[in-house]
Amino acid sequence: MASTDAPPATTTAATSSPAAASPSPAPEGKLSGKSSPRSAAGSPRNPGGEAIDPLLGEHWTQNPVEDDNDSVLDSILSSTASLSSSIFEYRNINGRTFHSDRTNAEYWGPNDDKQLQSQDIIHHCLTLVLDGRLYLAPIDGDRISKVLDVGTGGGLWAIDFADLHPGTEVTGTDISPVQPSWVPPNVKFEIEDATQPWTFRENSFDYVHMRYLFGSIADWDGLFQQAYTATKPGGWVESFEADANLYSEDGTVTEDSPMGTWTKVFKEAKKKFGRTFFPIEEDVQRQGIERAGFVNVTVKDIKVPLTGFPKDPKLKEIGQYSHLSIEQDLEGMVLYIFGEVMGWSVVEIHAFLAHFRKQIRDKNVHALFPVRIVYAQKPHKEKD
Ligand SMILES: C[S@@+](CC[C@H](N)C(=O)[O-])C[C@H]1O[C@@H](n2cnc3c(N)ncnc32)[C@H](O)[C@@H]1O
């Protein structure tokens, strides 16, 4: 159970015999058909001898995973070895489901159990990031009557809030009807596309919460304007976002590594997809909230460890949950963006993910990602 008692986190993260793995068995000869020459530095090259850009999926299929840790190597090899069946599993049973076309929203994440379980772990991780709190805005959860959680996903945040404050009516909205039905009596879920005109009455919510909408929103100003309209005078808005920016403070995440490539691909994707995965870098929360007319704006930046490398026990636990959530559904995080948006084949995506798994399991890699919480109040008197 999350509590609102603890103070907000002021997280500052601290910051074998080499074996060349053979390329995994190729489906229909696509993967291992020709092995490309490699440079002295190990970078894959095309038949003309030019280095293959890591932003092209081919770079990762032509670049066998190397590892000096046998157990890690085994698991990576087995995951790459199942490439061909994975592809057809995906296609045949269509194991990944995405939201219905009936909304105009375009969202990158699957809405199946695998992804929802990952979201549940992220929820726990992000609650730990806030020292067990569900929110930072100075609301009195027991004295307010109506709360809105936009893009609620599996609804855990809304459910926890409703459990914590049984006298408050909590509404969670999403484009997918994936929320559980066994919920506290003071929580309800509605299908609502946050990028379309909202159906809620003006001045009706005491508090509007939005978390992890990166990659979902083309017009952040419009989103916060609608939140402003729906919020009661004197009520609060809170936006909790992360950037798809995997970095280190000690040089252990390099630009051309899988994590560096992750960052670059998600950045490239915005040009084609029109939705940013870098809301912090683009400062969309603070700007959108201020432009909408909210006042008393507070911005809190926190560095979150991607894995359990920190020595500090609290940061280590946060990192362990973060790592777990990513490994729970690594494919779900990239399939749509790398495949549908950037044009990588499923084989290329899985080859990349094998490299990514190797890096994220490497205890010498000290990766972090940024999160930002912005909360602000609607003036008691409406703006002119
Ligand atoms: C990464 S999940 C975050 C879930 C939840 N807010 C949390 O923090 O655990 C993003 C959610 O936003 C939803 N979403 C994406 N675009 C949306 C839109 N236009 N309107 C409403 N929900 C949307 C997705 O369906 C997904 O459930």
Image (cartoon, helix red, strand yellow):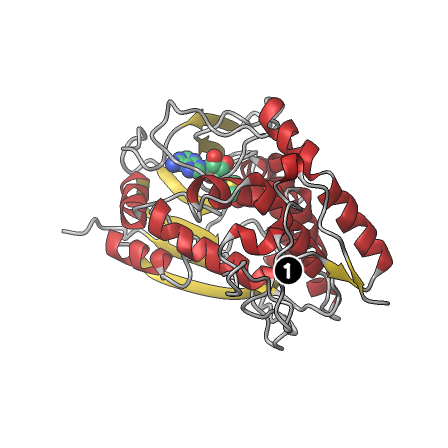
Q: Residue at x 38, y 29 (%)?
A: 192
* Residue behind mark 1: 306
Nearer-the-camera pick, 17 or 248: 17
Q: Residue at x 34, y 57 (%)?
A: 284
- Image quadrant holding the N terminus, namely top right
When the figure is inspected, residue 156 is found, relative to residue 128, above or below; the finding is above
Residue neighbourhood size for the residue with mark 1, other residues' Cα within 10 Å, grouped as few (<14), some (14–19), many (≥20): many
When the figure is inspected, residue 241 is found, relative to residue 198, above or below; the finding is below
Res. 56 in view: yes
Q: Quadrant of residue 114?
A: top right
Report the side of 268 relative to 62 (left or right): left
Nearer-the-camera pick, 241 or 46: 46
Report the side of 47 relative to 207 (left or right): right
Report the side of 53 relative to 3 (left or right): left
Q: How many marks?
A: 1
Q: Secondary structure at mark 1?
A: loop
Q: Quadrant of residue 200?
A: top left
Image coordinates of residue 265 in percent, x first then y, are 47, 55
Nearer-the-camera pick, 345 or 261: 345
Image coordinates of residue 338 in percent, x first then y, are 50, 46
Instruction: Name which residue type carries label 1.
Output: Leu
Q: Residue at x 69, y 68 (%)?
A: 365
Image coordinates of residue 235 in percent, x first then y, are 36, 47
Point out the residue furthest to the bottom here. Answer: 250
Q: Residue at x 56, y 44 (%)?
A: 333
When the figure is inspected, residue 280 is found, relative to residue 146, above or below; the finding is below
Nearer-the-camera pick, 219 or 315: 219
When the figure is inspected, residue 169 is found, relative to residue 377, above or below; the finding is above
